[in-house]
Image (cartoon, grey):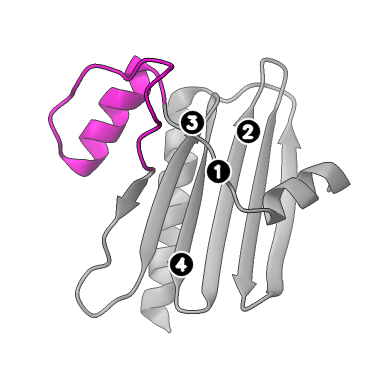
Amino acid sequence: MNVHLSLRLRRRRQTFLAGPLLTVLAAGLVGLPCVAPASATDPAPPPVTSPAPAGQDLQVEVIKKGLGKEVSIRKGNKEWFMMIEVTSDNTVIVRQEKENETYLVDESETHDRAMTTSEVDAAIDAFIISVKTQVKRK
């Protein structure tokens, strides 16, 4: 894994949501009516966060990042993270699982083509479902 990418991932991830497509996507995810996109001078809206269901303290946060996305899922002292970074030439996927400050999983893969938006969405959804299934089994 690239040292620069690894260091960047371990820092607190901060980004902002902008653009009409993201506004529609975020509104659809949280069930709100669609509103006009914010201008470049308006403050960034908060990331889309799924509230924890009763009996579970699972917190899911999905953030649009350029052409890709990142998702952070937390339950107690465990954290699961996936980032898909898409450029015009390739796609980098990073998966991490952390308990306290110990990384249990820290893997990345690079694909030699750009993933489509639907492929990114499907990969993020599959990751969220797999984490929820893993938590439910324990």
Q: Name the residue under label 3.
A: 119
Amino acid on which the number 2 mark rests in the picture: Glu
Relative to the observer, which residue lies in front, 111 or 76? 76
Mark 4 residue element: strand
Relative to the observer, which residue lies in front, 101 or 69? 101
Relative to the observer, which residue lies in front, 126 or 31? 31
Of marks 4 and 3, the one in the foreground: 4
Residues at badges 2 and 3 in contact (C-beta under 8 Å)? no
Mark sitting earlier along the chain (2/3): 2
Amino acid on which the number 4 mark rests in the picture: Arg
Give the residue drawn at x 30%, y 18%: 37
**Would residue 22 be counted in the magenta stretch?**
yes
Q: Residue 14 carries which label?
A: 1
> What stretch of residues is rendered in magenta?
18-46
Marks 4/2: CA–CA distance: 21 Å
Q: Mark 4 points at which residue?
A: 74
Marks 2/1: CA–CA distance: 15 Å
